Amino acid sequence: MNPDLGLRVLSSVMDWDDDKAHDQFQRLRLMATLKYDGYRDFEAGVRFTESLASWLQQFDSDQREAAYEFIMTRLVYIGPSEMEKLVGQFYANFVHPELLTAVAKQMDTPRHTLLANEEARERIGRLRRRTLFLGLSDGARVDYIRHQNVGLITNEQVVGSTQLDRAKWEDLLDELRGDLKDDDATFRAVYLIDDFAATGTSFFRLADGKAKGKLSKFATSVQEAQDVLEARIFEDDYQVFIHHYVGTAKARKELADRLDAGKGALAKAGLPPNISTTYGLWLPESLPLDADNPADGAFLALANEYYDDSITSRHTAVGGTADMKLGYGGCALPLILDHNTPNNSMPLLWAETAGSAPADGKDAVPAMRPLFRRRQRHI
């Protein structure tokens, strides 16, 4: 749709007079150009303004202003430029300091003197080569990690998955031993990388006393490969670093608590005790919508009224809530990532359902229209 036509349609939907339309068009053009038009999962030919006009039409006319104000004042959108900066800072802000700390401890030397010491630089290089970087999803941007760190990290250290087969583990180990000219070399650390954590349950949780989630699957992959290869891939008590480019306050606290409570289950899964969590960006505790915040009340009422329970599943139940009115885990986030909307965000932003007519004494269920359509993935 022509952008100007999209704005006129939106003006009609909102019943704006000319002055209001002129003021809002300036804001919308700026926001759409700088951010929202780049959302990757808009349908072909659709951009933000058209999507917004369509989305607003699902509400009664007297409810649309509250929905529009929510988008204009509460929505947080992390675009590709922001995410690329977080990816670009990953090595310098998190990996390199850990290498310096490890070598300083080995040599009993102050960190600030290491780079002037030839032996220390050599040790840093060897420890860096003995570090693996594994992506947990496409959002880990492992291709960008490679690109940003040419000459520091080799292609053979960076893999876009944690569930590797025997042949891949064998190849990684062979490349390591060839580069270090050491037939017994093993990896000493691994970074498990993802774009976003809102609850951390998909990464690690306990179910009936057993470890579940991506961390457990990584451990299983390592253990199975070592059994087949009859060789160690990692040294004893290797380090596991869990890095998310963006994390909520809820994820920071609850994931750390679960890892601490699950040390026994993690040990049974073959994981070391040295597991650390880091985040490139911490979202503020005040970000989620809150029923006690008068500014959020109107949109929360819409989220309750325009809700189709068909978006719940056995996967969403893992989040610990009876429904998805506030998103997975009850996170109530007003957050959009440019490559996909998290299911922890308010479903009114991303859910798409058919709804249903009244039947068997049940009320009609409204069809949910997405503003930022989400590609569904299992938890």
Image: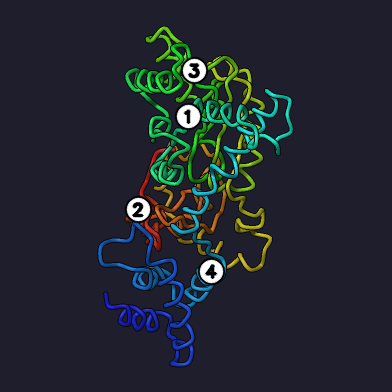
Query: How far is mark 4 from mark 1, CA to CA?
Result: 42 Å
* Residue type for callout 2: Ala
Q: Earlier in the sequence, mark 1 or mark 3?
A: 1
Res 265 visible: no
- For label 3, the residue is 186
Residue 352 is situated, as x and y percent measured from the top left of the image, at 36, 55
Identify the image quadrant of residue 117.
top right
Query: How far is mark 4 from mark 2, CA to CA?
Result: 33 Å
Q: Which mark is residue 359?
A: 2
Residue 340's place in the image compared with 184, above or below, is below
Query: How far is mark 1 from mark 3, CA to CA?
Result: 11 Å
Q: Nearer the viewer, mark 4 or mark 1?
A: 1
Residue 65 is situated, as x and y percent measured from the top left of the image, at 50, 76
Q: Of residues 68 and 341, which is closer to you in this image?
A: 341
- For label 4, the residue is 70
Q: Residue at x 55, y 55 (%)?
A: 333
Q: Earlier in the sequence, mark 2 or mark 3?
A: 3
Q: Earlier in the sequence, mark 2 or mark 1?
A: 1
Q: Of residues 299 and 203, which is closer to you in this image?
A: 203
